[in-house]
Image (tube, coloured by chain):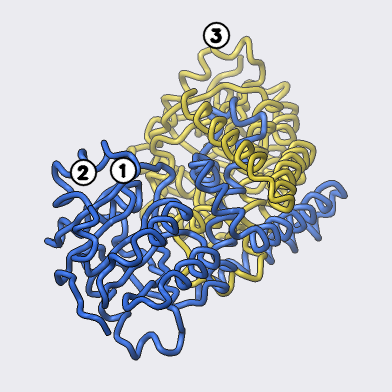
Chain colours: A blue, B yellow
């Protein structure tokens, strides 16, 4: 392995949006040195005031032990492709993209022939708002972190996971779950992507604009993530089209069953459908 | 008008479930005298320890200024039919049922020829749990209260609304919205009933049982009300079948549009759908 050139615990952040900004703030508050790059340079200048130690220039890249790719998928891939030769041997590069098959395949390929390691990551946190202005140091406190290693078998043995956990300590993740990219994408299509589609579709009823005084917690919860960053989710959804389409289809089929029972005024069937959902949710809560 | 026999501010509660228990606790903590009836007598005995002043017997009914029908719709209607002649002239009777056309029609009819007033009510609060054990005095703090008067025009003039607000003061409702039963049922089909159907249907994906470590806030919010009291919601859904069926149909149609765009890998169409949902939610928040 070639000689490492990184400074221990120094962190580079590529993209200062909601995620990148939160990583930068958490690591900085945790006493780590943080350098950042952003497509819009004004954000870097803003962050330099109290969040980061400087700009992630070509001179600084080889000195980072951890590099966090926190931009849009294609921006992250392009950056890694361009900077691959500058990254220090022994360094760890992670991304934060919400779907993992596409980005992992590309970044694992870029990493081939280099002595640094790419690890796919998906921090399971966020808000319905985007951008550096909404980022915060405690964004990841207690949140699950999904980790997609290059090889499932060899990963623990090489000690990369332990180093990654140490490097991300200031973020305060609640758990680290190892997964293949394929299994991650199946799960996420359901837990996150479908939730955003449903919430976004929910508000398209004409009743949305006249409900004031007629709503409580259930409406609020169902529509919280209707607000979303459309260009970003478009990209994430299309990179996971097979899984997401299947989940939407499953939900449509299930909703149709309730509608059929209601249209037929079939109380027994309707109650059975409701009781089954209640039972499945209870079962999931016990796991 | 016949002579009133009620004691000022004395409250009768019919049904000590989640709603009735919460009304009883709030009114009692607010210093009001509270008498209650429940189908299962053991609950009344339990409540008598620290929540109510006694049982709502036939002797006590004529002494209540406010009677709150907080049981299942049919139980409430049956009780009112049976006790109509015992209720004091000038008293106010409200219900708490989540759909208003059916119960209001029946209870307005029962009230005809009596000198007390029936007012349909829907307190927009609750939890995914049911029963007296989950009731609490602060259940209605800040919650909207929808009020369906016998006649929209004459109601304010007769001063009934002001008296009702005074009687319910200990509950701390955030607002009182006057509505017809028909408009209420349209709105509630969307804000509450559809939310419960979607949440209950959502957990029927096979992924529900394997998502541990792969979920965050959006899954939690979307599935919170999947847990529900199936026999109760069955009755509420069937009493609002026309409106609820229409809302489910609207949502299915909208979900299908996202699925079609995803299946066609039509990024532009998909982004337009997402941006439209974002815009509509933002617009609704401003109202």
Q: Is residue A107 visible?
A: yes
Q: Nearer the viewer, residue A138 or B33?
A: A138
Residue A164 lies, in percent from the top left, at: 28, 74
Residue B37 lies, in percent from the top left, at: 55, 49
Residue at horizontal 24%, vertical 52%? A36
Front of the two marks 2 and 1? 2
The tag on residue A47 is 2
Q: Are marks 2 and 3 in contact (CB under 8 Å)?
A: no
Q: Residues within 10 Å of mark 1 (few under 14, many from 20)?
A: some
Residue B145 lies, in percent from the top left, at: 51, 31
Tag 1 or tag 2, which sits nearer the N-term? 2
Picture quadrant where residue B92 is located: top right
Using the numbered discs, state the Cα–Cα distance from disc 1 to disc 3 in whole angstroms: 54 Å
Please state the chain letter of the residue tagged with numbered disc 2 in the rendered image: A
Vertical arrangement, residue B47 with respect to residue A38, above or below: below
Residue at horizontal 65%, vertical 48%? B72
* Side of A37 where A192 appears, left or right: right
Q: Do dots 2 and 3 share one subunit?
A: no
The tag on residue A132 is 1
Q: Nearer the viewer, residue B88 or B104?
A: B104
Residue B140 lies, in percent from the top left, at: 43, 40
């Amino acid at each position: 392995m070639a000689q490492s050139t990184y400074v221990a615990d120094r962190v580079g952040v590529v993209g200062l949006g909601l995620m990148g900004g939160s990583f930068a703030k958490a690591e900085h508050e945790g006493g780590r040195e943080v350098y950042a790059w952003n497509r819009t340079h004004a954000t870097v200048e803003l962050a330099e005031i109290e969040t980061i130690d400087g700009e992630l220039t070509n001179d600084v890249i080889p000195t980072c032990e951890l590099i966090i790719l926190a931009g849009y998928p294609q921006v992250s891939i392009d950056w890694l492709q361009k900077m691959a030769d500058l990254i220090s041997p022994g360094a760890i590069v992670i991304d934060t993209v919400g779907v993992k098959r596409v980005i992992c395949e590309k970044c694992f390929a870029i990493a081939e022939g280099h002595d640094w390691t790419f690890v796919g990551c998906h921090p399971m946190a966020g808000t319905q708002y985007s951008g550096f202005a909404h980022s915060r140091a405690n964004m990841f406190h207690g949140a699950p972190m999904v980790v997609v290693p290059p090889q499932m078998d060899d990963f623990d043995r090489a000690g990369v996971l332990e180093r990654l956990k140490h490097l991300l300590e200031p973020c305060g993740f609640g758990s680290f779950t190892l997964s293949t990219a394929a299994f991650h994408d199946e799960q996420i299509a359901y837990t996150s992507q479908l939730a955003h589609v449903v919430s976004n579709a929910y508000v398209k009823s004409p009743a949305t604009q006249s409900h004031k005084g007629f709503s409580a917690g259930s409406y609020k919860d169902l529509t919280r993530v209707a607000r979303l960053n459309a260009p970003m989710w478009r990209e994430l959804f299309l990179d996971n089209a097979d899984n997401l389409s299947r989940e939407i289809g499953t939900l449509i089929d299930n909703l149709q069953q309730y509608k059929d029972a209601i249209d037929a005024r079939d109380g027994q069937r309707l109650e059975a459908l409701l009781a089954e959902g209640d039972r499945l949710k209870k079962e999931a809560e016990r796991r």
